[in-house]
Amino acid sequence: MSPPLRVAVAGAGVFGLASALRLVRAGAVVTLHDPALGRPNASAVAAGMLAPLSEALTDPSAAPHLELLLAAQTHWPDFAAAFGAPLDQSGAILLGDADRLEVLDAAAKGLGFMLPAAAEPSALGLGEGVGGLRVSGDWRVEAGDLDRLAQAAQGLGVRLTTAAPKPGGYDLLVVATGASRRFQDLAPELADLTPIKGHILRYRSLIYQGPVLRGPGAYAAPSRDGLLIGATMEVGEGREGVDPKVAADLAARAEAVFPGLIGRDWTAAAGVRAATSDGLPLVGPSSTPGVILACGARRNGWLLAPLVGEIVAAHALGHDPGPWAAHLDPRRVKA
Ligand SMILES: Cc1cc2nc3c(=O)[nH]c(=O)nc-3n(C[C@H](O)[C@H](O)[C@H](O)COP(=O)(O)OP(=O)(O)OC[C@H]3O[C@@H](n4cnc5c(N)ncnc54)[C@H](O)[C@@H]3O)c2cc1C
């Protein structure tokens, strides 16, 4: 019998953890390395929306990839069960004035979806002339459950450490370091990554339950620790930490859509997403043998994570990585 595969995973975000969980379940010996263990990364500050259709309708970079995003969502019920994460299936409401809703309605029909008109959500108030369209297929998880995912991985034998992987100490390296290019010498495909910083606000005194409300300029998402308002897209900005002015601008935008927020206290957090030139992550073998990438999730890292974990594990173990792997192959980008 051959000895089990020893895998070093660099990065304890949702991509690294999903990969580690899948690999250890398949019998690999997995060590997960992250110098910032316990500090909030992009995964930890996210809104946790698993929203293929809303993303395709509101983000031009996601629109061409709707089929893949829908396929990724189908992996979620099993994945959530593996770490005991509740899956909120309340859906979403796309908000806007009559002109915006007409455009969204036409775009949805073009993709084969009918969106019924939605009643106005009263809890947060709504700006004048704002109506809604219901997207029932969107789901959501708590990004705070990243800790549960880490605990589930550890429970199955994944070792977590702040130390760097030691050459010779593993058979295979999985690079899941988010927006960092620290491993670019080893994996030249990482040169394709652009940072996109995102600020997000939390209104602790407002416990809202219901569909995610996606307005122009801001969304409101429920969370057990208070309402979340997101999120900025600061392309090219890779510095960590909250910028008070950017956060205040987001609050002002949100108040225009949800007047019920006016006068409420909020706190801000920020994370740096990594984006590739075609809007899809780099998942699979690097041009360097022995290195597998799982980076570049852009806005949909949580949504894509279980599919990414499956593909990483399949490549690592020499199994068929499935029909979506070719779309995500890192070697497609110019290194
Ligand atoms: C405000 C905001 C809201 C979002 N909302 C959503 C949402 O609703 N739905 C959704 O699907 N996605 C959302 N996203 C996107 C999602 O959070 C990201 O796409 C996803 O978290 C990226 O996961 P990751 O594991 O690639 O990176 P990260 O979560 O950034 O993790 C990378 C990890 O790598 C570690 N690392 C860095 N360098 C090294 C090194 N040299 N060695 C080892 N480890 C290293 C870092 O410390 C970090 O822990 C949001 C993002 C933001 C910022």
Image (cartoon, rainbow, N blue to C red):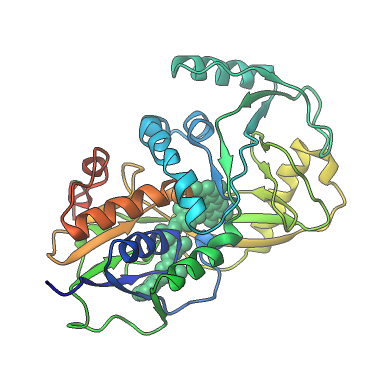
Q: Quarter holding the C terminus?
A: bottom left
Residue 235 makes an appearance in the image: no
Q: Position of residue 257 (x, y in %)?
A: 75, 36
Rendered position, 95 above or below 201: above
- In terms of image quadrants, where is residue 104? top right
- In terms of image quadrants, where is residue 194? bottom left
Q: Is residue 147 left or right of residue 290?
A: right
Q: Position of residue 114 (x, y in %)?
A: 55, 15
Seen at 40% across and 41% down, the residue is: 72
Q: Is residue 22 left or right of residue 28?
A: right
Q: Position of residue 223 (x, y in %)?
A: 69, 52
Depth check: 82 or 246 in front?
82
Q: Is residue 35 left or right of residue 233?
A: left
- In terms of image quadrants, where is residue 317? bottom left
Q: Quarter holding the N terminus?
A: bottom left
Q: Residue furthest right?
A: 263
Depth check: 190 or 226 in front?
226
Seen at 52% across and 38% down, the residue is: 51
Depth check: 181 or 9 in front?
9
Q: How many marks?
A: 0
Q: Position of residue 54 (x, y in %)?
A: 54, 32
Seen at 34% across and 71% down, the residue is: 10
Rendered position, 39 above or below 52: below
Residue 301 makes an appearance in the image: yes
Q: Is residue 212 left or right of residue 290?
A: right
